[in-house]
Amino acid sequence: MHPMLTIAVKAARRAGSLINRASLDLDLITVKHKSENDFVSEVDQAAEQSIIETLLGAYPNHAILAEESGEQGDSEYQWIIDPLDGTTNFLHGFPQYAVSIALLHKQALTHAVVYDPTRNDLFTASKGQGAFLNDRRLRVSKRIKLKDSLIGTGFPFRDFSHLDPYLAMFRDAVQKTSGVRRPGSAALDLAYVAAGRLDGFFEIALKPWDIAAGALLIQEAGGLVGDFVGNENFLDRGNVVAGNPKIFVQLLQMLAPHLTDALRR
C-alpha cells in the first residue's frame, strides 16, 4: 500500500471509531441545519478535524477540501474529505454511512478510501493499482442488460430545481431495471458499484467530496464514471452516472430523453 494511502486509511479508521462511539448515544448529539434538509452534527465536525489532523500531521504542506471546513492550503496535492457521508442516516440510527477521503494530485484522482464504520468495510484504491475491499480485489459486475441490473440513486434533497427531470429518470429506472435502491450515502453507493453490489448509479447535484473517492474505486475496478452526457467533468458538475461499462452506456441512453440544458452542461 502506498504511504499516502496508508495515512488516509489511518485517518478514516480514526474518524470511524469516533463515529461509532457517537452512534451509541445519538440523543446527546447537537445538530444544526446548514440549509433545508441538510444537517451537520458535532460528530461530522469532530470526525473532519480528526481526519485533517492525521493527514496534515503526515503531510503538512498538502491542501484540503473538506465538506464542513472548506478549502485550505495551496498545493498540487489536495485531499478531498467527507467525514460522514450520510449524516441524516447516522442521526436516525440507520446504519448506512461512510467516511470518504480522496487525494487529487495535479487534478488527477490518485488515492481513495471509503470506510463503512458500522460494517468495518474498508474500500481502497490507488491509481493504476486496482481497488480493494479489505484485502479482496474488486471488480465491477458482469451484468450486460439494464433490465437485469440493480441501480443505485439519490433523491434530490437540498435543491429541488431538478426534481421534475429527476422523477422522470426515476420512473424510467423503475420500469427498465430489476430494481432501484436509494440507501442515502453516495460515497458508499459508488463503492458498491466498484464491488459489483450495484450495477450502476446516477444522481444529480452531488459535491466533490461525495464523489471523489468512489469514482476512483469504480475506475480501478474496471467501471466507468461520467456526467450525464458521459464526459469526465463530473467532479465539477456534480451530476454523476457510474456503472460497469455496458450498464454505464445503457444508463446514459435511459437518462438522455430527460436532460434539461442545465443537466447537459
Image (tube, grey):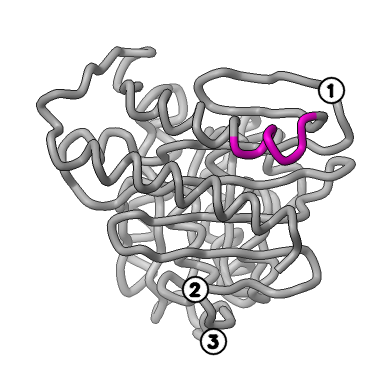
Q: Nearer the viewer, mark 1 or mark 3?
A: 1
Residue corresponding to mark 2: 134
Q: Main secondary structure of the magenta part?
A: helix
Q: CA distance from mark 1 to mark 3?
A: 41 Å
Which residue range is magenta in the image? Answer: 54-60
Relative to residue 168, is residue 127 depicted above or below? below
**Quarter of the picture holding the N terminus:** bottom right
* Snapshot quadrant of residue 129: bottom right
User: Which amino acid, mark 3?
Assistant: Lys
| Callout 3 crowding tier (Cα within 10 Å): few <14, some 14–19, many ≥20 | few
Q: CA distance from mark 1 to mark 2?
A: 32 Å
Picture residue at 65% right of the left edge, 58% below the top: 6
The circle drawn on residue 74 is: 1
User: Which amino acid, mark 2?
Assistant: Asn
Tell me, yes or no, whether the two marked residues, 1 and 2, touch with CB atoms within 8 Å: no
Indicate yes or no whether the magenta region holds residue 179: no
Residue corresponding to mark 3: 142
